[in-house]
Amino acid sequence: MRRRRGGKGLRSRRWMIGFLMISVLALAACGEKNAASGKESSTLRVGYGQLYGAPLADIARAEGFFEDENLEVEMISFTSGGLDALNSEKIDIALTFGTAGPLNYIAQGADFTFIGGHMEGGQPVVTKEENANKYKTLEDFKGKKIATVRLGTLDVIFKSALDDAGIDIQKDVDFVEVKSVADVLEAVQSGKVDVGLSNTGHLTKTEQIGLKPIFWSNDLSQNDLCCRVTVRGNISSDKAVAYKKFMKALIKAERVKLENPKKNLEASKPTFKQLPEERVNEIVNEKHLINSADPNKKEVVNTWGKMQDIGYIKDVDNIDLDDHFNLSMYEEAIDELIKENPNDDYYKKVLKRFNKQNVQS
């Protein structure tokens, strides 16, 4: 009798093919499930200003919050040109480039969108120590020369405060525009101007050269906004998932800073490698500086109005600023944190703050 050969091998091959097909289908199903739940890996290029650093992002990195979200974040520092980089798609997020700056780009036609916040307050008005007692009210700035960096956070806030007080910023005061905060401090120290509009992280230098803060931006505006989390418009579904993860990590990082400023300092040291610890602490933990991940839409809209009032942006009647906000990722981030921590009241307070600062009443 002739023996049949290869029967066992054929059955083995059929079994292997079936197994592989089942494995492929299982992997595909797993991939679909991960995609639906937002667990797939995402990568973001995040630009930040060297002067400000990126405190919340640094904490999120150090505490593993990005890793928890399966999010890869490449931090890219800029001395200038960060918003240009965002506009030309070289980065995905502009993190610490103010509020007035992005609004100015929007006024010029840039398709920028605000999705969150990062910094508030911490901007001092400075003068020589021996002259500090001369400035008690905004009226005391009449007739003075004031050094400023145009479109800086304090530049807009201070001019708007003067305008609100009925002081003509074109006639009653003399603003001298310079290129940097270092130039502001030098102008005040040398006597070229009476007062300077300084910035976060310069307090030590200010005091070393005989200058003193006389007002803080927090005194001039109750919700003094600085850096907003800014992205390009037309957000794809993949980017929306990544941005939600990013904001979720920043919300968690904000809590860490509030509860443990020391962790904020340690997390920020790698960003400011050349600076001593005391200087880094001054930049990221100055008592007037507030790190909040909340978008604070109402105050951004208020700043847009202020910039029009003082003549910084014109002919923008055709721009609907509402088109330049997308708060859904932030809302989703809060919802996830509340679901993940149902017994934690902190995130419920974050939601309450969001509704107060962003939802029209």
Image (cartoon, rainbow, N blue to C red):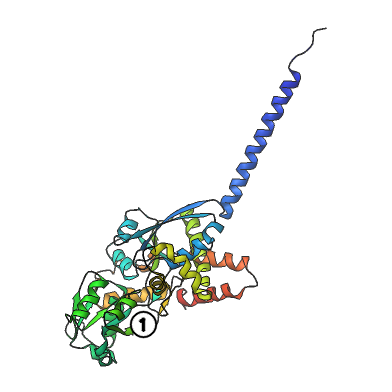
314 to 220, vertically: above or below: above
- Total marks drawn? 1
232 to 197, vertically: above or below: above
Instruction: Work out which residue is located at the far top of the displayed protein and give it.
Output: 1
Quadrant of the rendering where the N terminus is positioned: top right
Q: Which residue is mark 1?
A: 221
Q: Nearer the viewer, residue 255 or 32?
A: 255
Q: Locate residue 166 relative to residue 56 in the image: left or right.
A: left
Whether residue 327 is visible to the viewer of this picture, yes or no, is: no
150 to 127, vertically: above or below: above
Where residue 260 sits: x, y (%)?
52, 74
| Residue shown at the point (31%, 70%) measured from the top left | 100
Secondary structure category for the residue under label 1 = loop
Q: Residue 121 falls in which quadrant of the image?
A: bottom left
Q: Nearer the viewer, residue 161 or 50?
A: 50
Q: Residue 348 falls in which quadrant of the image?
A: bottom right
| Residue shown at the point (39%, 83%) measured from the top left | 222
Query: Circle 1: is it few (<14), some (14-19), or many (20+) Cα within 10 Å?
Result: some
Where residue 322 sits: x, y (%)?
39, 68
Q: Locate residue 98 relative to residue 35 in the image: left or right.
A: left
Q: Identify which amino acid the numbered label 1 is placed on.
A: Ser
Whether residue 171 is visible to the viewer of this picture, yes or no, is: yes
266 to 20, vertically: above or below: below
Q: Residue 120 falls in which quadrant of the image?
A: bottom left
Where residue 47 sits: x, y (%)?
38, 59
